[in-house]
Amino acid sequence: SVPNDDEATAAAGILLFKMSLQVLRQTGHDMYLLVDQPCLSPFVICESVSQARSVVVMLSAGSLECFQQLLVMVEVEAEIADAPDVESQPSVILVNLPDFGFPSPIFFERGLYAVWSSAPKAAP
């Protein structure tokens, strides 16, 4: 979820609370919220996504204006494309929260570039 979006963070926390014990019991792996670490480098975000079995993206009002969340979406799509077979692809769950608005064509012409070009350029 977007770091400063209370609705998205609350929804992610509720989802984590409801699912974490079952996920841990079935897989032996814990769940991780990127929103808990808002200062992660792009490298660390990509590394986290590349190791994930599933990725849940909480789509809220600021999702498409948040470089970190866009990076997660791009990286998970790259992981799916690079997977040797369907079984090794990560599962992707998009949760559309009530305040999320689907973008207009103008966003893809101007807004997406502005968010992507403002990305941090630092190494890990």
Image (tube, helix red, strand yellow):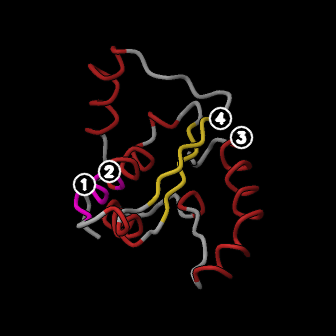
Under mark 4, the amino acid is: Leu
Residue labelled with disc 4:
97
* Disc 4 residue crowd, few under 14, some 14–19, many 20+, Cα 10 Å: some
Q: Which residue is mark 1?
A: 81
Badge 3 or badge 1: first in the primary sequence: 3
Residue 2 spot, x, y in % from top left: 56, 45
Residue 79 placement, left or right of 90:
left
Label 2 SS? helix
According to the image, label 2 marks what residue?
A: 77
Most common SS among magenta residues = helix
Please state the extent of the stretch shown in magenta in the rendering: 76-83
- Name the residue that disc number 3 marks: 7
At horizontal 67% and vertical 49% (from top left) the residue drawn is: 9
Q: Residue at x 31, y 56 (%)?
A: 80
Q: Is residue 25 magenta?
A: no
Label 2, residues with CA under 10 Å away: few <14, some 14-19, many ≥20: some
**Other residues around mark 3 within 10 Å, as few (<14) / some (14–19) / many (≥20):** some
Camera-side mark, 1 or 4: 1
Upstream in sequence: badge 2 or badge 3: 3
